[in-house]
Amino acid sequence: MRLSNTTALGLSALTVLALAGCSSSTEPADAPAASSAPAHRGGNAAKASAPLSSAELSKRLLNESDLGEGYTRKPRPAVRHDDVTVIGCPALEKLGDTATGSSLSFPRKARASFTYAGSSSSEVSEELYSDSAAKLSKGIGKVFDAMVSCPSYQVASGSTVIDMGTRRTTAPNLGDEQWSQLLTYSAGGRRSVVKQTAIRTGNVLVVVSGSPGLVDAHLEEALAKACAAH
């Protein structure tokens, strides 16, 4: 079985333009959510710090015209209810559904996936989330920390067992916080590598996953569009 790129972060499975709801923030990640709003200025400040809706996030996803020739958007897969189990990584096992789902558990989110040149082995996906800076930082940090705490483990899905390898990589210095990792999947004699990079800017989180070269090529573009006024 071939795991999708977003399943990697859902195991998730995840560049700087100023804008309401996506401007760079200097607040500590563990600050109370209420402190993320700047000083009151006739009500505009509070409005600017409000999380973006899923509909607004959807408008800020990359599309085929942004990516260029050779990219095709993948249809959203049907919901599956396979029994997915993490083996040999206690930190991921404790995350439960957050570790084995297809996206993070933030209510405001949007997602798109693309193949490049028609190849199922060359893919890139983007996920956008919006919440308070503190909640985004805690949520994504918890998942990444759990994943890199286990250099090797297994994921069982039905009768298929996938050998997993995870290592932290250096993320580009973008936004307020950054996370990046390389994941290796091995199953049925086949091996694939997925890169996953997440950037938090204010109350927007951008996660780009897929073939390492494609992630590096489109990360800044994804962040720029996610933070551009519409």
Image (cartoon, helix red, strand yellow):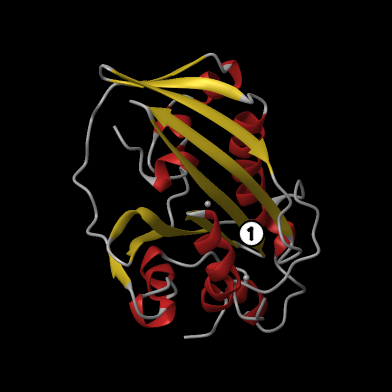
Above or below: residue 33 compared with residue 92: below
Q: Position of residue 197 (x, y in %)?
A: 60, 54
Q: Quadrant of the N terminus?
A: top left
Q: Is residue 12 visible?
A: no
| Label 1: few (<14), some (14–19) or many (≥20) C-alpha neighbours in 10 Å | many
Q: Position of residue 171 (x, y in %)?
A: 71, 55
Which is nearer the eye, 100 or 170?
170
Q: Residue at x 52, y 36 (%)?
A: 184
Q: Position of residue 151 (x, y in %)?
A: 64, 26
Residue at point 67% right, 50% down? Answer: 179
> In the figure, 68 relative to 163: above or below?
below
Q: Which residue is mark 1?
A: 199
Q: Which of 176 and 158 lies nearest the eye of the viewer?
A: 158
Residue 145 percent coordinates (x, y): 67, 34
Circle 1 — which element?
strand
Q: Is residue 124 left or right of residue 212?
A: left
As shown in the figure, which amino acid type bears the numbered disc 1? Ile
**Residue 189 found in image quarter:** top left
Q: From this viewpoint, is residue 34 visible?
A: yes
Furthest-front residue in view?
189
Query: Above or below — where is 93 with respect to 72?
Result: above
Give the mark count.
1
Q: What residue is at 47 percent from the left and 20 percent from the top?
A: 154
Q: Residue furthest left?
A: 78
- The image quadrant that residue 161 belongs to is top left
Q: In the visual, does 174 lie left or right of 95?
A: right
Q: Quadrant of residue 82?
A: top left
